[in-house]
Amino acid sequence: MFLLALMVCLLLAGCNAPDNHAIRFALASGPTNLDPRTTTDAAAERIDRLIYARLVDHDAHARPVASLASWVVLSPTHYRFTLGSRWRRFDDGTPLTAHDVAATYRSILDPAGASPHRATLSMIARIEVIDDDTLDFYLNRADRLFPGYLSLGILPAAKIAAHHPFHRRPLGSGAFRLLSWEQADRLRLQRKADGQILVFEQVKDPTMRVLKLLRGEVDLLQNDLPPELLAYLARQPGIALQRRPGSNFTYLGLQLQDPACGRLEVRQAIALGIDRPAIIEHVFHGAARPASALLPPEHWAGAAQLPRIEPDPARAKRLLAQAGYGPEHPLRLSYKTSSDPFRVRIASILQQQLAAIGIAVEVQSYDWGTFYGDIKAGRFQLYSLAWVGIKSPDIFRYAFHSEAVPPAGANRGRFDDPQTDALLERAQQADTEAGQAGLYRRVQRRLLERLPYVPLWYEDEYAAVSERIRGYTLAADGAYDALIDTHTVE
């Protein structure tokens, strides 16, 4: 039916005059804030990477590598960073120096700035600038992961002091500069190397995004399409479909202060009541892989040996009975999700699967802002989300340590487990990568036992690319970095 609707729309819709000199990228959700100190949504973080340079980046296994700066470890709590020659000039022409790096991170650490990254960087005791090219970070505790935390975009110190509105008027030293953001759903950037224009346009409806691609009004779509539309696009001339295994982790979050979800038997029953293989085969058409942990197996601290959660409805019913639920006393849960049609479809399937083990689930879908606001505030019993672009295993402290309850972190379900806390603290103090990786694998095993999240899957990355685009390649975490080298052919 949706394909018939798509063809009718193609016949009836008028073609907008495309900007043939721009690379046009359609997004399901556009950015709301382009200040790297405060952004948290995936679209904004990916666009920030195009606008701002950062001290440190990550390789294919999520190990930190030099970007703006290289570093040496002078002691376990003393790191010296030396800036290189690349990305050293801001869009307004001023040079990027160590003073700008220090000002950026000091502003993140300032409680008045309310940066969500402040807790992650709380080990920074002080920052000392040695000269324009060199600065030292002193820590209040040793943490081998520290260089990997310094992946936020660098802002000019003078503009920070002047309270420049970076959230709407970003000013960085990266590959692109902002040209205009006059419409909330349309962002125009310019590549500094050659003047190439890049347009990000928000098109919430997936069918309309496909229509715009087929009509030549946009050139690129990435993710957020139902499998049927992907299959349709794969048959269309002039469209190249790219796929690769992804690393973004989709999960069910639970409110552990809730009388029902706070019981381990209930969480285990939910996990065993979900048929992941069936959803991956029939809904994703194989374009996902089951997950047992937040980090993918190929990550340097990934836990590839963790067992998969296999569906077991009979055991799930026994666990619910142990928790006091059954036909005479059914368990009722509310499940919050975004209003994206595909996410609502997934929620409806999970609703049906959980109904089969005796859990009555009410699906509540909201626009993204309302939904995400409720999740951050802890207003949920059950919800589904994905962690996107995760590089550092410190995510486990941020999401699961008992001291990381918002606003100190993202422990939104109020998970409180002394054993997990102890493992996280030992992992932070480990003095070798092997020792640290082993402890983080133990953390992941413990989380699989306690289930503050119910792991679901890692969805594949995919992009539909117009034939007029050359050089765009998918990243495992969905980053848009390939746009730095993408060009058009007319």
Image (cartoon, helix red, strand yellow):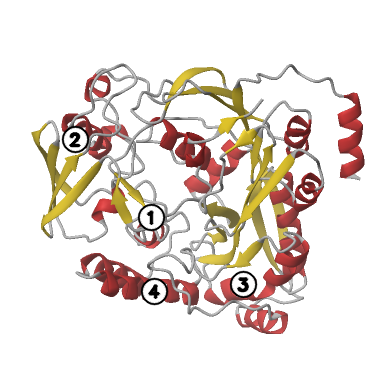
| Residue 24 falls left or right of residue 43 | right
Residue at horizontal 36%, vertical 61%?
A: 393
* Distance CA(mark 3)–CA(mark 1): 33 Å
Q: From the top left corner, tell me how far across and down residue 321 is, in percent.
A: 66, 81
> Mark 4, mark 3: which one is toward the viewer?
4
**Structural distance between the alpha carbons of marks 4 and 3:** 20 Å
Query: Looking at the image, which residue is at 72% across and 34% down?
Result: 209
Q: Residue at x 45, y 41 (%)?
A: 40
The CA span between labels 2 and 3 is: 45 Å
* Mark 1 Cα-neighbour bin, 10 Å: few <14, some 14–19, many ≥20: few
- The earlier-in-sequence mark between 3 and 1 is 1
Q: Residues within 10 Å of mark 2 (few under 14, many from 20)?
A: many
Residue 478 on image: x %, y %:
53, 47
What amino acid type is highlighted by mark number 3? Ala
Residue highlighted by disc 3: 271
Closer to the camera: disc 1 or disc 2? Answer: 1
**Residue topped by disc 4:** 441
Q: CA distance from mark 2 to mark 4?
A: 34 Å
In the depicted structure, whether residue 345 falls above or below residue 317? above
Q: Nearer the viewer, residue 363 or 276?
A: 276
At mark 4, the secondary structure is helix
The residue carrying mark 1 is 59
In the rendered image, which quarter contains the N terminus?
top right
Mark drawn on residue 102: 2
Residue at 23% from the left image edge and 27% from the top image edge: 96
